[in-house]
Image (cartoon, rainbow, N blue to C red):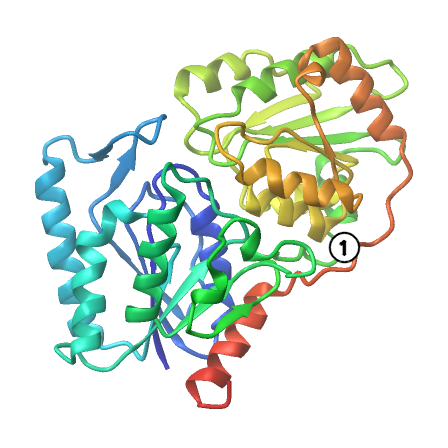
Amino acid sequence: MKVMVYCQHIWGVGHFFRTLEICRALDKHDVLLVTGGPEVKAVLPGHVRAFRLPEILTDPDYSALFASDRGMSLETTLKTRQEQLLALFKKEVPDLFMVELYPFGRRAFRHELDPILKAVRTGALPATRVVCSLRDILVEKNDPAAYEARVVNALNRYFDALLVHSDPRVIRLAETFSRVNDIHIPVFYSGFVAPLPPEGARRTLRRRLGIGKGEKLIVASAGGGKIGAGLLEPLLSAVGRLGPEYRPHLYVFTGPFMPQAVFDRLQRRADGRVRIFRFATDFLSHLAAADLSVSMAGYNTCMNILATRVPALVRPYSQDREQGLRAKHLARLGALKILSDADMMPARMAVVIQEALSRKPSRPISMDLNGARNTAAWLHEWMQGRG
């Protein structure tokens, strides 16, 4: 089966890496991953080919798009992308077209997706099954009624199935989308997409990093990195206040898109026990090796926390409900602790960190973390007419 996967990330890297994990699980098929955001350095599996549309980004307030190539206008970039995507679709003739997030989001890119979706339905393009790949929680909208009506109409008209990458025992789509019952296509809950660390990762990485048995390792991360300084800077100050009995090693991963000036400011605070990096291809192994994770509460980071069972403190992004709602669900299950506004003061954060480092490991939490494999298996059965 030939699968064409469309993923447009414009801010962080979560959408990209969740989609890549699903592509990885589709290892019995020919997969073409189409992206159009900032380049992410990631190794693709052998069965996955890549096609990059001209880059489009957004500003920090999500208020406007702009072309990464400053020599090309946004209008020209959008037209070029539309032409390239349509030509690629005609050339590849996929059996399955998987669209990440749209029509629940990325409405600014409808100009390049809608022509394909409409042409598939009218027969102007070869018959292709179309599915939407969606994370667990949606951000709030200014006009929820109009938004949900538009989404339901697009799903029922142009899509054949909706894949929700969540465990419904933890988070159901209806919590952030009231018209689930009006969706007339199959809705499949895949479980959370959570890659597992390599076997023995904790022991192997701690040995490689030279961290002794009695020493503590804290791993801090800020997702894609465009935001996160508000968490990482007080964390660095808090770690400096910890008692000598902890003597923690701190590995900070800022994310590939952290502004250079902010990264440089953090880098100047590094020393023998504090290391600052932008990115790590083996980040999951670092979490498995850690005694504590301090991070934002994005989808991928939370899934990494669940997969490694590392004690965790999270600071949800406050500009929309997504991270906060996910963190509250997981905190109720005992999977992590949420850092409050008061906890962001270095002295208070130091106390919270010491408490977390002293806490006994929590019991395993029962939830489905096999979302990528479940997605691949369901799609295979469904495409064979057995789903």
Q: In this orientation, which residue lies closer to the viewer: 45 or 321?
A: 321
Q: In this orientation, which residue lies closer to the viewer: 242 or 142?
A: 142
- Asked which quadrant contains residue 142, the reply is top left
Q: Residue at x 61, y 16 (%)?
A: 270
Q: Residue furthest front?
A: 145
- Asked which quadrant contains residue 168, the reply is bottom right
Give the quarter of the figure containing the N terminus. Answer: bottom left
Depicted 231 relative to depicted 375: above or below: above
- Residue labelled with disc 1: 200
Looking at the image, residue 106 sits to the left or right of residue 255; the answer is left
Q: Position of residue 52 (x, y in %)?
A: 26, 53
- Asked which quadrant contains residue 66, the reply is top left
Q: Position of residue 82 (x, y in %)?
A: 14, 55
> Can you see residue 23?
yes
Q: Residue at x 34, y 55 (%)?
A: 149
Looking at the image, residue 64 sits to the left or right of residue 174; the answer is left
Amino acid on which disc 1 is placed: Gly
Q: Residue at x 63, y 28 (%)?
A: 315
